[in-house]
Amino acid sequence: MENQMTEMFKGKKVLVAGGTGFVGVNLINRLLACGAQVRATLHARPPVLKDNRIEYVNAELTLAQDCAR
C-alpha cells in the first residue's frame, strides 16, 4: 500500500486547502514524503511547516477571484 501511494503522488502537483490546520499539515507531510509538489492555501494563520518544497498561497476560498488564482 505504501508503495502504491508513493507512486500515485510522486511528481504530481497537489493543492491542499487549509494548509495550516491539523489535517492540512499532516496531509502536506505525507504528500512530501511521497514526492508530491505541494501548494497550500493560507488564510488567517501563518504557515506551520517551513519547507522550500511547499508553495504557500494567501487565499480566501469563499472568493471567486482567489479560487481562480
Image: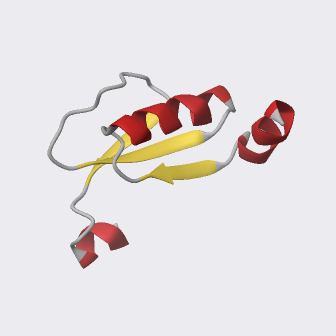
Image x and y of residue 40, in percent: 40, 46
Q: Quadrant of the C terminus?
A: bottom left
Query: Looking at the picture, does residue 34 appear above or below residue 64?
Result: above
Give the residue drawn at x 23%, y 71%. 62
Residue 6 lies left or right of residue 64; in this view the side is right
Quarter of the rendering containing residue 66: bottom left
Q: Residue at x 34, y 42 (%)?
A: 56
Q: What is the image's colouring? A: secondary structure
Look at 44% across and 25% down and name the residue there.
52
Residue 9 higher or lower than 35, as above or below: below
* In-front residue for pair 37/7: 7
6 relative to 58, above or below? above
Q: Position of residue 45 (x, y in %)?
A: 17, 38
Q: Where is residue 37 in the image (x, y as percent from the top left)?
A: 58, 41
Q: Residue furthest bottom?
A: 64
Looking at the picture, tell me which residue is in the foreground, 36 or 52.
Answer: 36
Q: How many marks?
A: 0
Quadrant holding the N terminus: top right
Residue plotted at (33% across, 69% down): 67
Q: Residue furthest left?
A: 44
The residue lying toward the viewer, choosing from 8 and 65, is 8
